[in-house]
Amino acid sequence: MIMLPEGFTAERHRRRTKISASAIFVCALALLTASCSRSTAGKTANGQARPAPVKVKVAPVERREQRRTVEAVGSLFAYDEVVVSSEVEGRVEEVMADVGDRIAKGQVLARIAPTELELTVEQQRAALQQARARLGLRDGEADAKDVRQSAEVKKAAADLADAEQRFRRAESLLETGVIARQVYDEAESRYKAAKAAYDLAVQQVENLRASMQQSQATLNLAAKKLRDAQVRAPFAGQIKTRLVTVGQYLKVQTPVMAIVNVDPLRVRLNVPEKMAPWVRVGREVKINLEAFPGRDFTGRISRINPAVDEKTRTFEIEALVSNPAGELKPGSFVKAAIPSDKVDPILTIPQSAALYLFGAYKVFVVQGHTLKEREVRLGDHFGDRLEVIEGLQPDEKVAVSEGGQVLKDGMEVEVAPFL
């Protein structure tokens, strides 16, 4: 049995015991909290060690005055291209050019056997000589200058003069009654017949002249066909396609070879309609091809289509590019840049600062020592910098990812300048 001190009741004992237990609990909780504080220092909420700040390079959003450049895509086309066809019938005797050969204007590409054509020329030449002989033309005389100088007309003129003289004499003798009326009538009839014969002779000579001209034209046509037996290049260029072989029989308009002129080349580009005010004839164009990385070719705009394509909302321009060495090939895909007179104030960032994530371009803006992800809208490309149309302000700075460095929203960083 426990003996309580005098004046110390059971109720007071219970109250003191309760207070003591509470004090012990508070002390224990304080010790536990201190211990936990020491154990979680340098850790995240999930108990992992907090990562050290990542060193990143930052670049300011720069404002600059930029000359606008029209960018377009298109293809190369030959300046001239033609399929040379046969203009006469015959068998191919010789082929004198093949694919890839450089040819000069007028160079013979193929020969057609000329035997039949040569015989036709001789036949027409003989017909012409016959017509000239009937006209009485001498060597060197191209045509009868005066039909009255031909033999037939001269004979008819002489007969007419004699008949006229006899008629005039008979007319005077009839008035004096020396001859009978019958003799006069006979003289008049002979005169009229001689006059008709003269007119007929003149007409025949005119017909002979026309026949001679026809024979001359036929001879010229036969001579042309003989020349056409040699198929020639209409302009200088290169053989694109060979379509015939020796021994093949050709008819008129049978394709023989395809020729292209590749110096200069035509560049046809599709330009957005909004850029129409910036494009003019004579403006310089710089083009590049995948076959020549890092190399630019220069041309000048020669033509501009006046209409806009309603489907693509673009219009076509054509530029001429010099190609003396034949390096560029028709049909190649090209990218082109056309400097303009338009100068705009723009904001730019390094190309490496923009990331394409989930269908949008994003950057990481440096706010103090933390990265904040932000979506931006980009414009043109200028060397190693990109135009920012929307999403950034001139006084802001963006993180630049280098060497595959992964940046995340909310990441703590240690800032280093971007050189």
Image: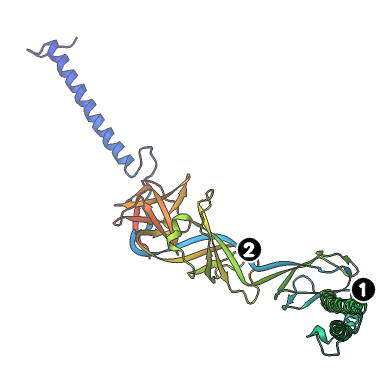
Mark 2 is surrounded, within 10 Å at the Cα level, by few (under 14), some (14 to 19) or many (20 or more) other residues, namely some
Image x and y of residue 21, in percent: 21, 22
Tell me: residue 142, above or below residue 381: below
Give the left or right position of residue 73, taking residue 329 as reference. Answer: left
Sequence-wise, the earlier of marks 1 and 2 is 1
Q: Nearer the viewer, residue 395 or 194?
A: 194
Q: Nearer the viewer, residue 284 or 350?
A: 284
- Disc marking residue 214: none
Q: Residue furthest bottom?
A: 139
On the rendered image, what quadrant is the C terminus found in? bottom left
Q: Nearer the viewer, residue 134 or 158?
A: 158
Q: Nearer the viewer, mark 1 or mark 2?
A: 1
SS class of the residue under badge 1?
helix
- Disc marking residue 116: 1
Residue at image point 37% right, 47% down: 374
Do callouts 1 and 2 mark residues in contact (Cβ within 8 Å)?
Answer: no
Q: Nearer the viewer, residue 74 or 165?
A: 165
Task: Examine the rendering and report whether any part of residue 106 can be seen.
Answer: yes
- The amino acid pointed to by label 2 is Ser
On the rendered image, what quadrant is the N terminus found in? top left
- The amino acid pointed to by label 1 is Glu
Task: Examine the rendering and report whether any part of residue 55 can be seen.
Answer: no
User: Residue 183 lies in what quarter of the image?
Assistant: bottom right
Give the left or right position of residue 97, taking residue 332 as reference. Answer: right
Report the residue marked by disc 2: 332
Real-space Cα separation, disc 1 to disc 2, in angstroms: 45 Å
Image x and y of residue 36, in percent: 31, 36
State the colouring used for the structure image: rainbow
Image x and y of residue 35, in percent: 29, 37
Q: Residue furthest front?
A: 177
